[in-house]
Amino acid sequence: MARTDKNEQPRKTDSQQQQDAPPKLPNMGLGMVAIAVYIIGGAATFAGVVFWVFYRSETLWGLGTGEAFGYLGICVGLIMTILGVLLMRLFRNHA
């Protein structure tokens, strides 16, 4: 007959120990990158709108008109914003 103390806790299996451990955040850095891409995309979109509206006929830095930079900012900004949203959804679902 085995003697057991009432203060002795039963041993936990590996799966139970993993459940008790605090969750690890391996994708936290990737999530921050996704949010940064989203924010930079939004800023580029609004900068493109500003160039397109206010600097439409002016030559900027000897490279092109404000209208061209505006279209570039709007298009690249929207693409980055969409990419940021998709990355956030991806990292949230696979975390």
Image (tube, rainbow, N blue to C red):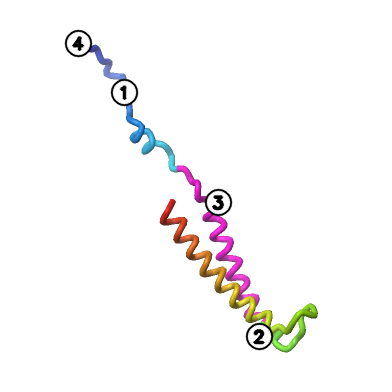
Q: Residue 9 carries which label?
A: 1
Residue 35 in magenta? yes
Which of label 2 and label 3 is nearer to you?
3
Magenta residues? 24-51
Q: Which residue is drawn at 73% across and 89% down?
A: 57
**Which of the two labelled residues, at mark 2 and mark 1, occupies the earlier sequence position?**
1
- The residue sitting at the front extreme is 63
Disc 2 marks which residue?
A: 53
40, above or below 68, in the image: above
Residue 25 x/y as whole percent: 49, 46
**Which of the two labelled residues, at mark 4 and mark 2, occupies the earlier sequence position?**
4
Disc 3 marks which residue?
A: 29
Residue 92 x/y as whole percent: 44, 56
**Which of the two labelled residues, at mark 2 and mark 3, occupies the earlier sequence position?**
3
Question: In the displayed structure, does residue 4 sit left or right of residue 38?
Answer: left
Question: In the displayed structure, does residue 53 sit left or right of residue 88?
Answer: right
Disc 4 marks which residue?
A: 1
